[in-house]
Image: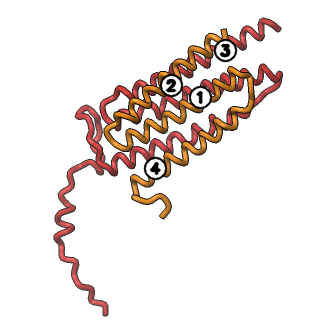
């Protein structure tokens, strides 16, 4: 029985350390990278993984404390895994909408960031009065 | 061993939140700040769960769930405001 407790303690400690290191790497990427499109990568990939590891440790700890499975923390994990891509998508859409500057090393050439000359001609075309009464 | 690991992971999460606060203060544009706040609420969920493990208490689970839901809703609301100039059309 004591061997089981020692083993579970080691597993919980491993998950705690791994999760906090993941979260620290994500936040370091958020603080260090050059432009917004690079900065979006770190937190949205890493922080959910870090919190997922911590929640796994919490599940293991409370299961050991109760002597039975306690799966309530899975709710937070599932919720974060569903919502993190949605918020990252909305953030990138709003960044493209604001036409944020980008580092020259950032790849890709999305439509929203290209210099468009068509806007001018669209404005200058006569609207044309409608024939309807 | 568990005490030691808990202390180390609380310290690492605190450093992560300080880095997010730096990005909130410095971040040159609005989406940067929203992204930093988004990361900050995810990290604070982990801090609350760690606090619950430390005390051996189950009460803090509900607080973490509430922060998760309200954080997602607020991020989506601010992004919609930036995109559309309005939240509910």
Image height of A13 relative to B29, above or below? above
Query: Could you tell me residue A52's position as x and y percent?
Result: 60, 29
Among the chains, which one is orange?
B
Residue in the picture at 38% in, 43% down: B31
Marks 3/1: CA distance?
17 Å
**Toward which corner of the image does residue A9 lie, by quadrant?**
top right
Q: Earlier in the sequence, mark 4 or mark 1?
A: 1
Q: CA distance from mark 4 to mark 1?
A: 23 Å
Query: Label 2, on which residue?
Result: A23
Tags 4 and 1 both on a single chain: yes
Check disc 1 and report the residue beneath it. B46
What whole-number distance in Å separates the C-alpha atoms at marks 2 and 3?
Answer: 18 Å
Q: Name the mark on residue B72.
A: none
Q: Colour of chain A?
A: red
Q: Residue shown at 46%/41% (left/top)?
A: A88
Give the chain letter at badge 3.
A
Residue occupied by mark 3 = A11
The chain to which mark 4 is attached is B
* Mark 4, secondary structure of its residue: helix
Mark 4 lies on residue: B78
Q: Are marks 4 and 2 on the same chain?
A: no
């Amino acid at each position: 029985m004591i061997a089981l407790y020692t083993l579970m303690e080691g597993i919980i400690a491993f998950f705690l350390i791994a999760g906090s290191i993941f979260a620290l790497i994500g936040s370091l990427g958020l603080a260090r990278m050059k432009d917004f499109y690079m900065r979006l990568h770190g937190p949205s990939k890493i922080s959910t993984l870090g919190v997922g590891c911590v929640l796994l440790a919490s599940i293991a700890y409370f299961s050991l404390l109760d002597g039975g499975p306690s799966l309530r923390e899975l709710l937070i994990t599932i919720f974060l895994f569903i919502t993190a891509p949605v918020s990252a998508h909305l953030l990138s859409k709003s960044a493209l909408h604001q036409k944020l500057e980008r580092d020259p090393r950032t790849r890709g050439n999305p439509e929203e960031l290209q210099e468009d000359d068509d806007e001018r001609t669209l404005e200058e075309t006569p609207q044309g009065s409608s024939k309807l009464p | 061993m568990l005490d030691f690991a808990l202390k180390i992971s609380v310290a690492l999460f605190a450093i992560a939140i300080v880095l997010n606060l730096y990005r909130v203060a410095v971040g040159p544009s609005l989406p940067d700040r929203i992204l930093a706040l988004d990361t900050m609420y995810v990290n604070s969920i982990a801090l609350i769960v760690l606090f619950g493990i430390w005390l051996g208490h189950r009460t803090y689970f509900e607080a973490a769930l509430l922060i998760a839901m309200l954080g997602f809703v607020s991020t989506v609301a601010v992004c919609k405001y930036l995109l559309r100039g309005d939240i509910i059309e």
